[in-house]
């Protein structure tokens, strides 16, 4: 299977899940993006590595792994997000040992990405994962990430005041964000209009 290279586009707070973040990965040679919901510790670790700022007083777990790898001459070569199973991404990172043998190690996707940023190695996925979970975000959605401010304001006024085309876009975004409660409310409003 062909690998598709990704890079980190954004790391934002999740509108649909409290105390979660969305890691947005761009397809390098295309327009699709892969949104992955991650926890606060991993988001913080990725953000610190991306900012390349002063490290914390004590090493984070991912920094500790880098120290061990450097001291034992283990080369971190790539990350592959290989599976999407029941809404959860699965990944592996690949290391080259002193003897040159490449070893695949199972990891949570957020941890694998945190290590990839530190080792400055590429992140890949497969077409089937990207076609299943990839999305194309336009500029307005990217600015607000999951919902634009205009949509949020309109939602507060009630779904009945939103145009059908806008509701269909909101439904798609709610499903992509795995906010099924909001998706069911929007779906019910669309169905009630279609029944009339």
Image (cartoon, helix red, strand yellow):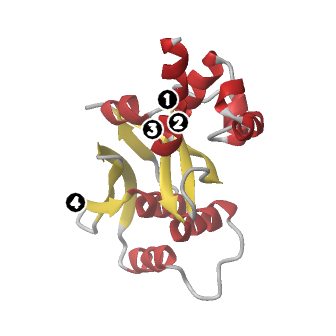
Q: Which residue is mark 2?
A: 185
The first of marks 4 and 1 along the sequence is 4
Residue nearest the viewer, comparing 185 with 146:
185
The first of marks 4 and 2 along the sequence is 4
Estimate the spatial distance between the alpha carbons at disc 2 and disc 3, rounded to whole Å. Answer: 36 Å
Numbered circle sitting on residue 101: 4
Numbered circle sitting on residue 188: 1
x and y percentages locating residue 141 in the rendered image:
67, 33
x and y percentages locating residue 172 in the rendered image:
51, 29
Residue neighbourhood size for the residue with mark 3, other residues' Cα within 10 Å, grouped as few (<14), some (14–19), many (≥20): some
Indicate whether 30 appears above or below 63. Answer: above
Q: Quadrant of the N terminus?
A: top left
- Residue located at (38% from left, 55% from top): 77
The first of marks 3 and 1 along the sequence is 3
Estimate the spatial distance between the alpha carbons at disc 3 and disc 4, rounded to whole Å. Answer: 22 Å
- Residue located at (39% from left, 74% from top): 69
Quadrant location of residue 31?
Answer: top right
Estimate the spatial distance between the alpha carbons at disc 3 and disc 1, rounded to whole Å. Answer: 38 Å
Q: Are marks 4 and 1 in contact (CB under 8 Å)?
A: no
Residue neighbourhood size for the residue with mark 1, other residues' Cα within 10 Å, grouped as few (<14), some (14–19), many (≥20): few
Q: Which residue is mark 3?
A: 5
Q: Secondary structure at mark 2?
A: helix
Of marks 2 and 3, the one in the foreground: 2
Indicate whether 40 appears above or below 130. Answer: below
Of marks 4 and 2, the one in the foreground: 2
């Amino acid at each position: 299977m062909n690998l598709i290279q990704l890079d980190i586009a954004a790391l934002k707070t999740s509108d649909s899940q409290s105390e979660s973040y969305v890691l947005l990965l761009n397809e390098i040679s295309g327009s699709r993006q892969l949104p992955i919901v991650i926890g606060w510790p991993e988001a913080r670790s990725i953000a610190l590595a991306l900012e390349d700022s002063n490290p914390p007083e004590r090493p984070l777990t991912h920094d500790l792994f880098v120290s061990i790898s450097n001291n034992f001459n283990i080369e971190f070569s790539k990350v592959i997000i290989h599976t999407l199973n029941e809404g959860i991404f699965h990944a592996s990172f690949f290391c080259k040992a002193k003897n040159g043998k490449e070893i695949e190690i199972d990891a949570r996707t957020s941890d694998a990405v945190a290590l990839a940023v530190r080792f400055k190695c590429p992140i890949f996925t497969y077409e089937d994962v990207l076609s299943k979970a990839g999305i194309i975000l336009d500029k307005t959605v990217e600015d607000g990430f999951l919902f634009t401010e205009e949509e949020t304001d309109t939602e507060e006024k009630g779904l009945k005041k939103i145009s059908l085309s806008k509701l269909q876009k909101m439904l798609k975004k709610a499903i992509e964000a795995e906010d099924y409660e909001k998706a069911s409310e929007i779906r019910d409003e669309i169905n009630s209009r279609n029944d009339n």
